[in-house]
Amino acid sequence: MATVIGRLLGLAFLLCFGTGLYSHFLQQPLPWMRFPTRPTGLYQWTQGTHIIAGIACFPLLLAKLYVVFPQLFQYPPVKSFANFLERASIALFVGASLVEITIGLLNTYQWYPFPFSFKQVHFALAFVIIGSLLVHIGVKLPVIAAHWRATPAPGPDERHPVDTGEDTAEDAPADGDDGQGLPRTRGLTGRLLAYIDATPRMAPRTSRRGFLTTVALGVAAVVGLTAGQTVAPLDGANVFGPRKKGVGPQGVPVNRTSAQAKVATAALAADWVLTVAHGGTERSFSRDELAALPQTDVDLPIACVEGWSQMASWRGVRLRDLVDQVGASPDADFRIISLEQRGGFKQTEMGREYVRDSLTLVALELNGGILDLEHGYPARMIAPGRPGVLQTKWLSRIEAIDA
Amino acid sequence: MMTTTPAVSQRMRAARVALIGLGVLGLAWGAYVLVDTVAVQRLPGVALWIGAAIVLHDAVLSPLVFGLGVLTRRAGHRLAGGIIVTVQAAIVLGSLLSLIVVPAIIAQSLGAKNPTVLPLDYALNLGVAWLVLAAGSIAVSVWFYARTRRANQRPSLFQS
């Protein structure tokens, strides 16, 4: 049983780890890294998977801990030095896993009651968890291998809260089996123990089936009732998701508002221009000048690191047409600078694969109307397969890096 | 456990050494990233949360679940096992949803960063979820009860 749940939990952890690393490197790429721009909803799917698998970890991790809980009380508590290290790594694994999924969940609510930075700790703990998971799998490998090979046969002295075998048909009811070698405890404790011992037994097979059904229903419930914020067909069932599709200005949710970014004055100024620079060449475009250039329509999702995503129709100027006006070379990567004065993403970098992509726009319109101030008026970036934080709003300057 | 495994094959041994080695590397890298990127005065907070998570689970949540199991079995010891499991499952599912949704309700009451964050009525939806679970578990229990009664009323094939 521990292996059955553990397998699913391990899978969920690996999905979270892989998609988390992908998201991390999209935002902080190593110099040599290039990323696929198709399918256009790639990040929507990887990050949606990250959040969905993370939520599924709640029932799976709790179920796993429920199954192995009696092992917490093994006697003697520590058998050897190796055993001590193993138990310590499990304690770290349990604690770090619980913290990881909890702060991840709270981050999707944009609520930060913990005394440390979310991003760095969430990233570091991921390695701690995967590391201690590998140690744990290494230690338990014989048990896991035996489970893959044949029907599990729990040892006679192995105790599980969930019955694992077909045997254990109790011949005597538990009531009143005193004098079995154990001294009777007196007083309140004794009465409590007697009360617990007198608990009627149930057919073990029902219990096992009931446990697995409950875990399956738990995963289905937490995923099914929240995943609609990412997966459009489940939108109707989205009653607990932190975001709702179609809720927001122009039908698109917002992460960072113009008020938070303190850009309203600069963005609404009459003399706003977008400056495009490559090497020594610089050109500035007013919004009317941008609107006079050839316009392209694309359908691309906004996909947030917090897991929600929203399909939208954008209209604007192809970025590659714009940078070609200042004679950009096809190998140039660009720095995209916002009007924002503060914030981790006031300037971002865009690799050449996105700059040259025909779907990458400097967007002026959204869903048939002028871009709302909350969505980045006067102009914003929209590119395929990138996280929302890199779809820079309130554009100010686009310049080639090292050119 | 390491010591009680009989006849560990050579390949198994190699695989275990590799897994544990990789795991220790991962742990070390995680610790390095933590110390490297998080301000030193924040680290006790991380340790506190990890420790508190273990204590909360082992000393609060688990005893609660255990007590709940004993209580439902005691309370329903004349009922068919299926009914007890159904009721337990409904309580577990409701608690699980509450565990995930109550923080959303708190975050919402503290004030969301903008109107598109946490836009739903989560308290109402959670209440409805509990009602649906109650109704569902009652329906399943009635079905179990009727089935058990039918089975008990049928003349037994094995009695003579």
Image (tube, coloured by chain):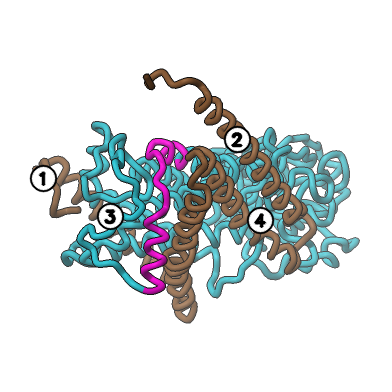
Chain colours: A cyan, B brown
Q: Main secondary structure of the magenta part?
A: helix
> Closer to the camera, A391 or A158?
A158
The subunit letter for the residue under badge 4 reads A
What type is the residue that disc 2 sits on?
Answer: Val
Residue type, numbered disc 1? Pro
Circle 4: residue type = Ile
Front residue of A290 and A176? A176
Front-most of B134 and A5? B134
Q: CA distance from mark 4 to mark 1?
A: 61 Å
- Label drawn at residue A135: 3
**Disc marking residue B140:** 2
For residue A381, side relative to residue A9 (left or right)? right
Q: Position of residue A2 (x, y in %)?
A: 35, 46
Q: CA distance from mark 1 to mark 2?
A: 46 Å
Q: Is residue B129 left or right of residue A36?
A: right
Chain ID at mark 2: B
Instruction: Please tell me which residue is depicted at 14% across the width and 40% down the height of the picture.
Output: B11
Name the secondary structure under disc 1: loop
Q: Are marks 4 and 2 in contact (CB under 8 Å)?
A: no
Mark closer to the chain start, 3 or 4: 3
**Marks 3, 2: nearer the viewer:** 2
Q: How far apart are the two marked residues, 4 and 2, measured between alpha carbons?
A: 58 Å
Q: Could you give the CA–CA distance between mark 3 and mark 2, rounded to whole angstroms?
A: 43 Å
Chain ID at mark 1: B
